[in-house]
Image: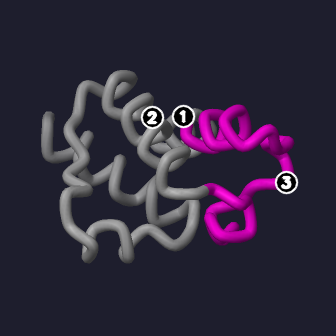
Amino acid sequence: MSKDIDASIIALIASSGEIEADEITRDTELAELEIDSLVLTEIVMDIEDKYDIEIDLNTAEAWESLKTVGDIIDMVKKLVADKT
């Protein structure tokens, strides 16, 4: 399931940024992908729906913690694991 989450999130990011998924890795910085906060919010909402989780991004600190694709993946994996 872990690899499925990685691939799924990379696919979501790629489709919303109109970027090829094979160009995105865990180390890819969101700034490199030119993903602004509005698009990131849409990605987060899609992830929440897909995995039936709630990602709390109501603080500046939460937004600042998301610098790379891997940061998003790690957050989702933790929330999914906490749910089970």
Q: Residue 23 has which mark?
A: 3
Q: Amino acid at mark 1?
A: Asp
Residue identifier under label 2: 1
Q: Nearer the viewer, residue 41 or 74?
A: 41
Magenta span includes 32: yes
Q: Are marks 2 and 1 in contact (CB under 8 Å)?
A: yes
Q: Amino acid at mark 2?
A: Met
Q: Residue 4 has which mark?
A: 1
Residue 74 image point, x, y percent: 40, 59
Residue 4 image point, x, y percent: 54, 34
Q: Is residue 67 left or right of residue 30?
A: left
Q: Is residue 42 left or right of residue 30?
A: left
| Magenta residues (range) | 9-35
Which element type, helix, strand or loop, lies under badge 2?
loop
Query: 10 Å neighbourhood of mark 2: few (<14), some, or many (≥20)?
Result: few
Rounded to the nearest whole Å, what is the CA distance between mark 2 and mark 1?
5 Å
The residue depicted at 27 percent of the width and 68 percent of the height is 62
Which corner quadrant of the image does residue 57 belong to?
bottom left
Query: 10 Å neighbourhood of mark 3: few (<14), some, or many (≥20)?
Result: few
Which corner quadrant of the image does residue 80 belong to?
top left
Rounded to the nearest whole Å, what is the CA distance between mark 2 and mark 3?
22 Å
The residue depicted at 53 percent of the width and 63 percent of the height is 70
Which element type, helix, strand or loop, lies under badge 3?
helix
**Foreground mark, 2 or 3?**
3
Query: 10 Å neighbourhood of mark 1: few (<14), some, or many (≥20)?
Result: few
Which element type, helix, strand or loop, lies under badge 1?
helix
Is the residue 49 above or below the residue 4 in the image?
Answer: above
- In primary-sequence order, the first of circles 2 and 3 is 2
